[in-house]
Amino acid sequence: QVQLVESGGGLVQPGGSLTLSCAASGSIFSGYVMGWYRQALAKQRELVAAITGDGSTTYGDFVKGRFTISRDNAKNTVTLQMNSLKPEDTTIYYCNADGRHLKLGDYWGQGTQVTVSS
């Protein structure tokens, strides 16, 4: 079982920055693909960024170099640094731990709200 707890959301002005953190429980953390997703009202959940255990990363097309995902396997944490935030980035962000390639589970955090507004 993996439990995920997000933190770091909040209100920021356009052009500002936020750092989202996700703390994961479980001794097999490094085997999971860790990711951040977001879901706006009445829209499908979309990938923001993902990182494998060896550090390979994938980003959603809308990120365009503004966000950086990283992980610390020793501390069981994954971080999303978000810069140059836009009003359209406003939504709930979810941490994900995907172990299905290891025939393990797919886990989600409770979500953290990010609001970009002046």
Image: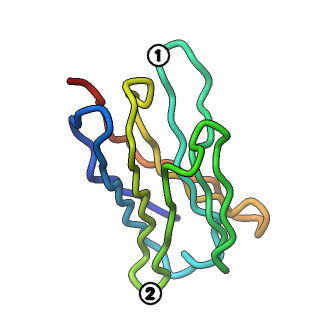
Name the amino acid, label 2: Ala
Q: Residue at x 43, y 76 (%)?
A: 76
Q: Residue at x 35, y 60 (%)?
A: 21
Left or right of 101 in this view: 71: left
User: If you read the primary sequence from the N terminus, does the residue marked by circle 2 or circle 1 appear first?
Assistant: 1
Q: Look at the picture and state if 88 lies above or below 25.
A: above
* Residue picked out by circle 1: 41
* Residue picked out by circle 2: 74
Q: Tell which of 87 and 20 is nearer to you.
A: 87
Horizontal and vertical percent for residue 13? Answer: 23, 33
Horizontal and vertical percent for residue 67? Answer: 49, 52
Left or right of 54 in this view: 95: left
Q: Look at the picture and state if 78 lies above or below 54.
A: above
List the single residue furthest toward the top. Answer: 42
Q: Residue at x 50, y 36 (%)?
A: 38
Q: Secondary structure at mark 2?
A: loop
List the single residue furthest toward the bottom. Answer: 74
Q: Tell which of 89 and 103 is nearer to you.
A: 89
Q: Quadrant of residue 43?
A: top right
Q: Residue at x 63, y 53 (%)?
A: 106
Q: Circle 2: is it few (<14), some (14-19), or many (20+) Cα within 10 Å?
A: few
Q: CA distance from mark 2 to mark 1?
A: 35 Å
- Say the numbered circle drawn on residue 85: none
Q: Tell which of 91 and 81 is nearer to you.
A: 81
Horizontal and vertical percent for residue 90? Answer: 38, 28
Name the amino acid, label 1: Leu
Horizontal and vertical percent for residue 58? Answer: 68, 56
Q: Secondary structure at mark 1?
A: loop
